[in-house]
Amino acid sequence: MPSPFRIEPFDKKRHGRDRFDCGQPMLNNYIQHQVSADIRRNLARCYAAVHEDEPARLAGYYTLSAYSVEAGGLPEELEKLPYPEIPSVLIGRLACCRTFRGMGLGKALVVDALKRAVAMHDHLGIHLVVVDRLGEDVVEFYAKFGFEETENGQLILPVKTVKASMRS
């Protein structure tokens, strides 16, 4: 069954944020007050999910940014890479409005972010996809996609692993 959600680049004129509530004040505040400035300053790109029945209402979102991870503290095979920092893409924020929970939206957002990371990988040197937990207990959720927790609490997934899973 196809997803009832469409994920597209965030547009403050098209994606209504006034009723967005994911239960996390920091993530609500970000989408309602800060995201446009981050996009304008080229600090992040935001992708918005809308439900087919309410295309003007924001159902969820995530952000992507360029990032680097210190090799120390990574799994041994990654520590062997020849640089002290590993080029990565960061899923900095990901949130689903409470109204749309239980509909597969979180999964759809992560899958979309991973597809975009793979597309970037084909044009830019990126070795990892990283999730910054922002103090949230999301390890179990991201583990379903293959992310592993590092010593410093970040969640990482090699892009080659993502590409391999998309081929199978």
Image (tube, grey):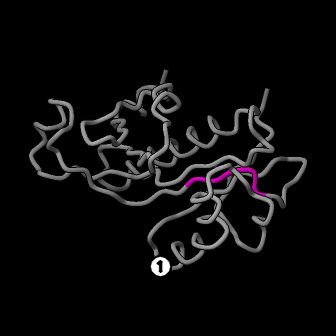
Asked if the stretch drawn in magenta spans residue 61, the answer is yes
Q: Is residue 14 above or below residue 97?
A: below
At horizontal 59% and vertical 65% (from top left) the residue drawn is 30
Horizontal relation, residue 45 to residue 124: left or right: right
Q: Which residue is mark 1?
A: 41
Asked if residue 24 lies in the magenta stretch, the reply is no
Residue 75, quarter of picture: top left
Residue 90 x, y percent position in the rendering: 41, 52
The x and y percentages for residue 91 are 46, 50
Helix or strand or loop: what does disc 1 sit on? Answer: loop
In the displayed image of the protein, which residue is found farthest to the top? 168
Residue lying at the far right in this picture: please name it.
53
**At x 64% / y 38%, what residue is drawn?**
106
Q: Amino acid at mark 1?
A: Arg
In the image, 91: left or right of 1? left
Q: Position of residue 12 (x, y in %)?
A: 71, 72
Above/below status of 104 relative to 9: above
Q: Main secondary structure of the magenta part?
A: strand
Q: Assess disc 1: are there few (<14), some (14-19) or many (≥20) residues with their C-alpha within 10 Å of its C-alpha.
A: few
Q: Quadrant of the N terminus?
A: top right
Q: Nearer the viewer, residue 146 or 133?
A: 133
Report x, y in % for residue 67: 33, 57
Query: What are the residue bounds of the magenta stretch?
Result: 58-62
The total of numbered circles placed on residues is 1
On screen, residue 142 versus residue 56, left or right, reads left
Task: Name the residue rendered at 62%, 65% in the picture.
Answer: 29
- From this view, report whether residue 4 is shown above or below residue 58: above
